[in-house]
Image (spheres, grey):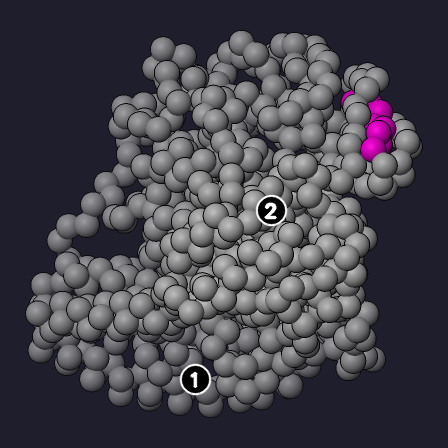
């Protein structure tokens, strides 16, 4: 052990306390031992350091920091260099604010467009998500701050996120849900990782030896620390034994006592505790040294301009009929839509950044060479109809040559802590759009939304620019693209399906009971649409430019694929070329094509460049569930180079002669997986995929400490059911107000155990046990345990505190 000298001086109490947080964001420091404390902060697209009272949901104000576009936006740039620059900038701001660990990036897979946190995640594809995440990690860590890729793993649903069991087969786990993390760890060299709230195949992610030890540390060589998500620890001792180092946020000393008791009883070993302490000491000591002589300031203007460049590179031109864009100098335009006045530029929850400034289209458009006939909010943000504003907008539209309509998802549509239940934008915006279409045929739509939405109204527009959530400097970036000083080069990092019903997890998401069954398996996003031949509105990897690119001269070698791209248009621009690999007539089932590389190339008009995308260890591999290792099936692979997943420009082939000797599947038993038509996978077929029985997921019997508060619906106790009804009423009221109440959402989905894990020692697990008894109908017994537990906890806390006073 590296820190044997310190560890040998630590008491068991100090070790146990050290492995848990102190306060919302900090770790324990021990002066007597020379152990400093470190500070963690969200979040992925800007620093959210709370100056006053800490809470983890972005409710209390944080220090001003640059609000960059969210991960869902930046992924559309397909630009790893940009990711690294953003990482460096985030790292610099973190350092200036005294933050040692930046809790991001988030790279969970967008299994369904409905996940409330999709705006914080990169992609439906693990390769793209991993590459982008690795670039952030490299940038952040270059500044002496540790990045913390999250949430490890299979955390693609917000509903009851802390009490959900994700059930999936090992191949889907490895190929879809872990590959991104693997890239972030191996290529980004991430030094911390955040364990997710949920269970993975029946074991909490934070206690999952398979994930944290076998895969993360042994297979991938991770040499950093595992930090629990805020409240994600269930059994701290099992977490420590599985490879988790730091229980956050504020479990109090009851948790430390639990750890000591586990050592005493032999449930876990002292070696496990020492190993975790050693790893954590390494992080704490390194981060402390890194932060010496740090600067307390950063250049807000420079960072703002980086945010603007990032927003410009990440916007996607979805449509541009009659080349209506870029706007001609002096074009007569009407600006319509509330988003032009109050931009929708980031999402809600723990990632909420307090921006250094916010630019708006309404304020900036005057400095562009356009004739603005007027501006109107057009629709109201809360979804209600507003006849006067609508009339104002329609009058303006009638007077303009071109209408710029700013619209999309409202704040209350997507948020941490809740999933959407449909993919529509508010109806009042659609109503206005239909009327605008009656008075002006030249509509240009500028969309803000953090995740895929249904666009049945797309035909109203001649052009559509999808900006996702583009950060505090988004307005200038949009105007630069609309007027042509920037040529759009973003490509979709997720598919825009035609309708929610077409999405692969439509029948499986979100799960309502205890388990979330990943029946669609590998068929996430374009992997499904392409294989099952489901038409989509805009495919994965799609995005237009003001210029055009020609692809030619493909050659393939063992090392990779080379080809040429020529800019055959009249404007300088950048193209994202994508490498997909497939194997027809494969013996194992597999998606028709999978992304295995990409390159973003800038070209002047007429310029031609040769591009090489190297193959890597992921190009041909698949996870063989029989032999339990990565293998390559022999065959003649298609090497496809495309400008999107649906537009393959060049193809070639390469033979691979490695052999899979033990075939993992029997084609006859798995027709849905062999055809990709996974909409209705039967129990029997899912069991074949899982290789075991489907675990029982139905609620029955009594509630326990891991059930969420919203499950009190099933409680035996009338009092608990009353509490459930009250909580639901408060939630409904908050939902109806148009602004999600994150506290209520959090409590609604929170398991009973979190009362102990997040209250700094005020509540012990014994008291939680008492509450659960009450809920299960044993009122007096339960209250007795709560009251007795309260006094016991207080006494024990005091005694423990005395022991660790440094
Ligand atoms: C979120 C994490 C976040 C943490 C701290 C949790 O609720 O899931 O992403 O880093 O809170 O704010």
Is the residue marked by circle 2 packed among few (<14), some (14-19), or many (20+) residues within 10 Å?
many
Viewer-closest of 17 and 101: 101
Q: Confirm or reject: label 2 Cβ below 8 Å from ligand 1.
A: no
Looking at the image, which residue is at 62% across and 11% down?
634
Pair 1/2: label in front: 2
- Residue 86 x %, y %: 74, 59
Residue 365 appears in the figure: yes
Q: Is residue 573 magenta?
A: no
The chief SS type of the magenta part is: strand
| Residue 797 position in % (x across, y down) | 39, 85
Would you identify the image quadrant in which residue 284 lies? bottom right
Please, what secondary structure does the residue beneath circle 1 have?
helix
- Quadrant housing the C terminus: bottom right
**Residue in the picture at 36% in, 48% down:** 422
Task: Check disc 2 and report the residue beneath it.
Answer: 442
Residue at the spot of label 1:
800
In this view, 593 is above or below 659: below
Compute the Cα span from label 1 to label 2.
71 Å
Label 1 with label 2: CB-CB less than 8 Å: no
Q: Position of residue 15 (x, y in %)?
A: 53, 72
Is 523 positioned to the left or the right of 582 in the image? Answer: left
Residue at 27% across, 67% down:
732
Q: Residue at x 31, y 27 (%)?
A: 680
Which range is magenta?
561-569
**Residue 567 lies in the magenta stretch:** yes
Observer-nearest residue: 337 or 392? Answer: 392
- Circle 2 sits in a helix, a strand or a loop, which is it? loop
- The tag earlier along the polypeptide, 1 or 2, is 2
Tell me the quarter of the picture where residue 739 sits: bottom left
């Amino acid at each position: 052990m590296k820190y044997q000298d310190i560890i040998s001086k630590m008491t068991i109490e100090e070790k146990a306390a050290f492995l848990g947080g102190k306060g919302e964001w900090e770790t324990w420091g021990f002066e007597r031992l020379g152990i400093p404390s470190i500070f963690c902060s969200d979040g992925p697209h800007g620093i959210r350091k709370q100056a006053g009272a800490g809470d983890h949901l972005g409710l209390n104000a944080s220090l001003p920091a640059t609000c960059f576009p969210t991960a869902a936006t930046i992924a559309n740039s397909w630009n790893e260099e940009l990711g690294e620059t953003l990482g460096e900038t985030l790292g610099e701001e973190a350092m200036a604010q005294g933050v040692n660990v930046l809790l991001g990036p988030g790279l969970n897979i967008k299994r369904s467009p409905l996940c409330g946190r999709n705006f914080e995640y990169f992609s439906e594809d693990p390769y793209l998500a991993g590459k982008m995440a690795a670039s952030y990690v490299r940038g952040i860590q270059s500044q002496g701050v540790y990045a913390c890729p999250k949430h490890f793993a299979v955390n693609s649903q917000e509903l009851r996120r802390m009490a959900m069991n994700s059930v999936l087969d090992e191949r889907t786990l490895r190929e879809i849900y872990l590959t991104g993390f693997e890239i972030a760890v191996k290529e980004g060299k991430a030094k911390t990782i955040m364990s997710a709230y949920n269970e993975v195949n029946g074991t909490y992610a934070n206690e999952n030896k398979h994930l944290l030890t076998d895969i993360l540390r042994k297979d991938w060589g991770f040499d950093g620390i595992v930090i629990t998500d805020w409240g994600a620890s269930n059994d701290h001792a099992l977490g420590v034994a599985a490879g988790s180092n730091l229980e956050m946020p504020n479990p109090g000393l009851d948790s430390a006592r639990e750890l000591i008791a586990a050592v005493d009883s032999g449930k876990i070993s002292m070696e496990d505790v020492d190993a975790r302490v050693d790893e954590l000491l390494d992080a704490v000591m390194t981060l402390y040294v890194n932060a010496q002589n740090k600067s307390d300031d950063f250049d807000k203007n420079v960072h703002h301009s980086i945010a603007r460049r990032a927003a410009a590179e990440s916007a996607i031109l979805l449509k541009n009929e009659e080349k209506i864009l870029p706007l001609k100098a002096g074009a007569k335009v009407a600006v319509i839509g509330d988003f032009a006045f109050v931009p929708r530029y980031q999402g809600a929850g723990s990632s909420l950044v307090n921006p250094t400034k916010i630019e708006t289209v309404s304020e900036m458009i005057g400095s562009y060479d356009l004739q603005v006939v007027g501006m109107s909010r057009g629709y109201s943000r809360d979804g209600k109809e507003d006849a006067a504003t609508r009339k104002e907008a329609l009058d303006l539209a009638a007077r303009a040559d071109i209408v710029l309509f700013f619209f999309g998802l409202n704040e209350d549509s997507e948020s941490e802590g809740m999933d959407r239940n449909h993919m529509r934008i508010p109806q009042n915006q659609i109503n206005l759009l239909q009327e605008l279409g009656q008075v002006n045929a030249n509509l240009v739509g500028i969309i803000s939304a953090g995740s895929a939405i249904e666009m049945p109204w797309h035909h109203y527009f001649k052009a559509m620019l999808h900006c996702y959530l583009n950060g505090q400097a988004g307005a200038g970036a949009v105007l630069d693209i609309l007027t042509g000083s920037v040529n759009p080069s973003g490509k979709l990092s997720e598919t825009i399906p035609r309708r929610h019903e077409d999405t692969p997890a439509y029948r499986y998401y979100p799960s309502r009971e205890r388990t979330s069954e990943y029946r669609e398996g590998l068929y996430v996003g374009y992997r499904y649409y392409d294989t099952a031949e489901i038409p989509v509105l805009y495919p994965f990897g799609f995005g237009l430019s003001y210029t055009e690119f020609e692809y030619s001269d493909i050659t393939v070698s063992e090392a990779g694929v080379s080809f040429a791209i020529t800019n055959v248009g009249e404007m300088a621009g950048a193209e994202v070329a994508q490498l997909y690999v497939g194997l027809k007539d494969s013996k194992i089932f597999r998606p028709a094509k999978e992304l295995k590389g990409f390159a973003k190339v800038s070209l002047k008009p007429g310029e031609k460049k040769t591009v090489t995308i190297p193959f890597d260890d992921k190009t041909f591999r698949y996870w063989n569930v029989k032999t339990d290792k990565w293998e390559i099936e022999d065959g003649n692979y298609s090497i496809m180079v495309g400008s999107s997943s649906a537009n393959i420009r060049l193809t070639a082939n390469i033979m691979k002669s490695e052999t899979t000797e033990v075939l993992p599947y029997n084609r006859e038993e798995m027709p849905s997986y062999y055809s990709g038509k996974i909409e209705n996978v039967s129990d029997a077929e899912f069991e074949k995929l899982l290789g075991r029985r489907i675990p029982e997921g139905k609620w029955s019997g009594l509630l326990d400490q891991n059930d969420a508060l919203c499950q009190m619906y099933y409680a035996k106790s009338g009092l608990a059911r009353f509490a459930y009804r009250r909580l639901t009423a408060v939630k409904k009221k908050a939902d109806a107000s148009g602004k999600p109440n994150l506290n209520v959402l959090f409590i609604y989905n929170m398991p009973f155990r979190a009362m102990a894990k997040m209250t700094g020692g005020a509540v012990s697990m014994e008291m939680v046990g008492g509450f659960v008894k009450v809920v299960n109908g044993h009122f007096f017994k339960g209250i007795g345990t709560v009251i007795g537990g309260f006094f016991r906890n207080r006494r024990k806390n005091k005694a423990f505190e005395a022991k660790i006073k440094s």
